[in-house]
Amino acid sequence: MSSKVWGGRFTASPNQLVEEMNASISFDQALLDEDIEGSIAHVAMLARCGIVEEAEAEKLTEGLKKVHEKVTSGVATLSAQYEDIHMNVEMLLHEEVGELAGKLHTARSRNDQVATDMHLYLKKKVHNIIGLLKDVQHVLCDKAEAHLDTIVPGYTHLQRAQPISFAHHLLAYFWMFQRDTGRLEDSLKRIDVSPLGAGAIAGTTFPIDRTFTAELLGFDEVYPNSMDAVSDRDFIVEFLSNASMLMMHISRLSEEMIIWSSEEFKFVEFDDTFCTGSSMMPQKKNPDMPELLRGKTGRVYGHLMGLLTTLKGLPLTYNKDMQEDKEGMFDTVETLEKSLSVLAPMIESMTVRSEHMYESVKQDYSNATDLADYLVTKGMAFRKAHEVTGKIVLTAIQEKKNLLEVSLEEYKSYSSSIEADIYNCLRPESVVAARDSLGGTAPNQVKKQLNHAKSLLKSNY
């Protein structure tokens, strides 16, 4: 005879391998807090609706609190014998209050119970991740404010394009992360919905009050359809999608910092506390942290694709396949929390080599667009100005000069309208300052952008 709580229908216990594969307690124990919280709310509702007596509800509630205390303190242990966090809690509750523990599951299924746990868990975690993301944005703003006047080469196709403010470059990531914050905040609309009371599939015959439990648990809404309530995992897919986008942005920033820290660039240097050495080459200082952040992006993408694949062919409602929804979610939460917690102090402690950045700008041809624009102001059509500038750059490359080293006589050989003021026009500071259009890299625009960013953090943090 099976000893399982669902064993009345069975004449034999499961195969040992089946038990091991079926059990989820090794990972869903992470839902302990939420499972206890949901159960306490469920008990309160049962008493309110007259399904259990007030005295029974008080005893069950106290018992649940003791179970939580014993498990978190290590006095009580969770066992694979009872499959999941829900049955482990119920078995431990039985030790506290005896047969009364059997009333806890009245008007409830593990199907709506686990869905409730995950909604509660993800709601807390998304709020925490948003807070960590804001920490990174604060650091980016602080670093940008310190480098409003720092000029760095800007790149397209990883080729020198135009000089830009380093603050402008950093703030580009602020806005990426701001969109990530917006997506996470918006996802809370789908997370903040209560499945509790949906039962296994069709609701329950007991006169329950789902709105009451939703209010107790802090949910804004209640699923209007019991079948959807127990089978919906869209909120987890959406979280994994948002997490993938966030990790992609973290990875892009990490990649740039890795490049900037190389000997070839020497734009930044990471603090020793965020680097490691080589077991063979004593001179090495490896940017392992940004490399790991870049690498961990792949595992988050994998969790998204894994859950999408798991769900794509599932008929309504609950199927055991859905047990696969948790490990990827837990791992993604942990990955994001660790990644953001490392990223903020790593950026904060990073040394910016402003002088080397400036010297790099002076040695390239990223001011060529300004030469073309200068010719346009002298009445030349832009396409012609583009062609003439290209020829000047080609000659300068062949003669190993930068555009500030080309003589006025040489310039005039291409266009008699070029005057001595061309040299001021081509200075890196002038090139940056000239881009004074909305969202541009001119100091005036970057200051406006920075103030906007800081005001957003102040109002939402």
Image (cartoon, rainbow, N blue to C red):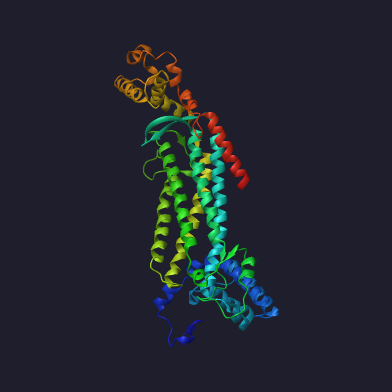
What residue is drawn where x is 42% and y is 40%? 256
* Residue 264 drawn above or below residue 34: above
Q: Quadrant of residue 377?
A: top left
* Residue 331 drawn above or below residue 151: below
Residue furthest left as drawn? 398
What residue is drawn where x is 56% and y is 46%? 135
Residue 202, position as x, y percentages in the image: 51, 76
Q: Quadrant of residue 290?
A: top left
Q: How many marks?
A: 0
User: Is residue 33 found left or right of 386 in the rendered image?
Assistant: right
Q: Quadrant of residue 323?
A: bottom left
Q: Nearer the viewer, residue 289 or 146?
A: 146
What residue is drawn where x is 42% and y is 27%? 361
Residue 428, position as x, y percentages in the image: 45, 24
Residue 346, position as x, y percentages in the image: 51, 43
Q: Nearer the viewer, residue 241 or 265?
A: 241
Q: Nearer the viewer, residue 398 or 262?
A: 398
* Residue 380 drawn above or below residue 439: above
User: Is residue 63 found left or right of 312 in the rendered image?
Assistant: right
What residue is drawn where x is 40% and y is 69%? 314
Residue furthest top as drawn? 409
Residue 423 can be seen, yes or no: yes
Residue 183, position as x, y percentages in the image: 51, 52
Residue 363 can be seen, yes or no: no
User: Is residue 98 found left or right of 168 in the rendered image?
Assistant: right
